[in-house]
């Protein structure tokens, strides 16, 4: 199992508010490939794609419109 997290690097400064999980690009339970964009997170005015760290089946942990903080886990990928 591998965690899908919102990278801390997306917050370039400590001044930005938390992010918002805008949408899932892949359905819960779908098979994903390593590096495939699985979610979109808005931080300030920027929209960022979040990629799967490895291939397998995606298990969504956070709902759409959830507030996200740097490094938080939003899904898991199971082989």
Image (cartoon, rainbow, N blue to C red):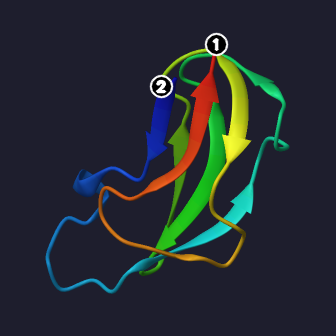
Residue drawn at the location 30% of the way across and 64% of the way down: 70
Q: Residue furthest left?
A: 14
Q: Which-is-in-front pick, marks 2 and 1?
A: 1
Q: Nearer the viewer, residue 42 or 24?
A: 24
- Give the labeled residue for mark 1: 79
Query: What secondary structure is found at the residue carrying circle 1?
Result: loop
Name the image quarter holding residue 64.
Answer: bottom right
Q: Is residue 60 above or below residue 1?
A: below
Residue 41 x %, y %: 55, 63
Question: Is residue 23 left or right of 41 when viewed as pictured?
Answer: right
Q: Tag 1 or tag 2, which sits nearer the N-term?
A: 2
Which residue has dot 2 on it? 53
Residue 43 sits above or below residue 32 on the image: below
Residue drawn at the location 67% of the way across and 78% of the way down: 65
Secondary structure beneath disc 2?
loop
Pointer 2 and pointer 1: residues touching (CB < 8 Å)? no
Residue 66 percent across, percent down from the top left: 60, 77
Crowding at dot 1, Cα within 10 Å, few <14 / some 14-19 / many 20+, comes out as few
- Residue, x 70% and y 40% (percent of image)? 59
Classify 53 as above or below 18: above
Q: Quadrant of the C terminus?
A: top right
Q: Is residue 32 left or right of residue 28?
A: left
Specify few, some or many for label 2: CA neighbours under 10 Å numbering under 14, 14-19, or 20 or more: some
Judged left or right of residue 24, residue 62 is left
Residue 56, image x and y in percent? 68, 17
From the viewer's perspective, is 1 left or right of 26? left
Give the CA distance from mark 2 to mark 1. Answer: 12 Å
């Amino acid at each position: 199992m591998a965690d899908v997290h919102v990278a801390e690097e997306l917050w370039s400064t400590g001044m930005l508010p938390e992010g918002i999980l805008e949408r899932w690009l892949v359905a819960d339970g779908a098979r994903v490939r390593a590096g495939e964009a699985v979610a979109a997170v808005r931080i300030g005015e920027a929209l960022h794609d979040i990629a799967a760290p490895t291939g397998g089946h995606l298990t969504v942990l956070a709902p759409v419109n959830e507030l996200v903080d740097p490094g938080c886990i939003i899904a898991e990928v199971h082989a």
